[in-house]
Amino acid sequence: MHTPPPDDPIAYVDWHLNHMRTNLHKDMTAVHVWEFTLRTKDVRGMHALAKALTKARYLTTVQDVVMESTFEEPPAGKGKAKGKGKWKTVEGPPMVTAFSRGKPTAVGLKRRVRALLALAAKHNATYSSMSSMDMEEFEMLYGPPKAMSLDDACWRLRHHSDLGLKQGAKIEYNFCLIAKDVKACTAALKKAGFENVSRAPEDANWTISVTLPGTNNETRLQAAFATMKQAAKAAGGTLKGVEV
């Protein structure tokens, strides 16, 4: 039975470790990368907080523009008069992400979370979340871009759900293709009706990116993957993986 994560950040540590052990079957003796996110009121506070976290020996990244999707409930009504809810994208507060390495121990992680809560309060910021990655996942996300297998992408969706993303929430699927003739393959894909086709980042291990609208749903991702695989082959390319 799935137990939803608690709101309390200290209690969340125990929940997350149990989730790693029971559901994800992670090696609890191995070193993991711990990712903590904090939100500030403005860009100036973001840089000040990032500086303090760096001084505390965290690897940090900053994001001054964070687009967030929120669901607006439908207006009250009955029958045909009942409205429909809709997703709305708004700009959220700046975010600072702090990374540290260590083994998954409750005592050590709770000590870190308490210290981060205190640091956030000192800088008029808000502690937001904690998550974990093994070293391979960290390299995939923050090293040179790498295409993700379909199985790994499905696991990523489950991770998104565990962190609170609703089933069916709108996200993008970025399909990763390789082709000997990038120009010809790109042209063929666009002719086939794929509008969002671009060259991959320079240091990526694929050559063409195709972005499609999707949802946080494994079945839909699998279907889109199969469709994209056929389309890539028809255009003279090979589907290497996907980013979600």
Image (spheres, rainbow, N blue to C red):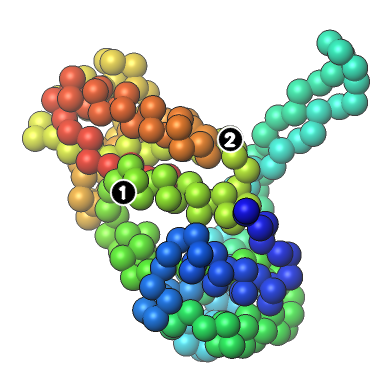
Question: Can you name the residue that lies furthest to the left here?
Answer: 180
Residue 114, percent across and down?
Answer: 67, 84
Q: Is residue 4 above or below residue 226?
A: below
User: Furthest-right residue in view?
Assistant: 77
Question: Secondary structure under badge 2?
Answer: loop
Mark carried by residue 170: none
Q: Where's residue 116, x and y in %?
A: 63, 81
- Does residue 214 lie above or below 193 as drawn? below
Instruction: Looking at the picture, tell me which residue is in the foreground, 174 or 229.
Output: 229
Q: Residue at x 38, y 46 (%)?
A: 153
Residue under numbered circle 1: 148
Q: Position of residue 138 (x, y in %)?
A: 37, 66
* Residue situated in front as seen by the camera: 25 or 140: 25
The percent position of residue 81, horizontal first and vertical second, equals 87, 14
For badge 2, the amino acid type reads Gly
The number of numbered badges drawn on the structure is 2
Is residue 173 visible in the rendered image? The answer is yes
